[in-house]
């Protein structure tokens, strides 16, 4: 019976010790700071695809900022080529 109580106490001490050490680590603080906010999506005017704004290619066309999913779409839009339906 004494062994069982000893092991339970040892496990509790280890748990609280690890909990105390881990809460001061940098990755645990990132969880608190970095709240998951939804990403803003923008639509490619050429292929009509929605993409996260941070990954989109940005180009100013006729005093308007447009966002594109790829170089190919951006170049096609600037040349005013019709989109392939294939």
Image: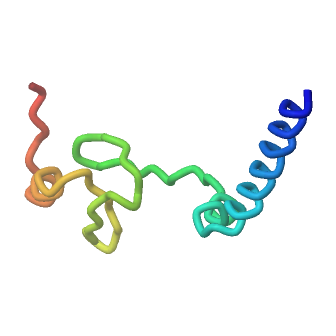
Placement of the N terminus among the 4 image quadrants: top right
The image shows a total of numbered marks equal to 0
Q: Looking at the figure, which quarter contains the C terminus?
A: top left
Q: Nearer the viewer, residue 85 or 5?
A: 5
Which one is in front, 49 or 25?
25
Front residue (pair 12, 44): 12
Q: Position of residue 22 (x, y in %)?
A: 67, 60
Above-or-below relation of 9 to 80: above
Residue name at image x 75 percent, y 55 percent: 19
Question: Which residue is drawn at the image coordinates 23% and 41% (left, top)?
Answer: 47
Residue 28 vertical placement versus 48 (above, below): below
**Residue 59 image offset from top left, x and y in percent:** 26, 68
Q: Position of residue 39 (x, y in %)?
A: 51, 52
Does residue 57 appear to the left or right of 52 in the view shown? left
Image position, residue 63 (x, y; %):
32, 74
Hey, which quadrant is residue 21 in on the image? bottom right
């Amino acid at each position: 019976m004494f062994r069982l109580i000893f092991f339970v106490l040892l496990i509790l001490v280890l748990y609280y010790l690890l909990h105390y050490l881990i809460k001061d680590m940098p990755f645990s603080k990132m969880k608190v700071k970095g709240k998951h906010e939804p990403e803003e999506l923008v639509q490619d005017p050429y292929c009509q695809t929605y993409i996260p704004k941070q990954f989109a290619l940005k180009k100013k066309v006729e005093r308007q900022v447009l966002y594109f999913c790829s170089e190919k779409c951006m170049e096609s839009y600037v040349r005013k080529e019709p989109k392939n339906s294939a």
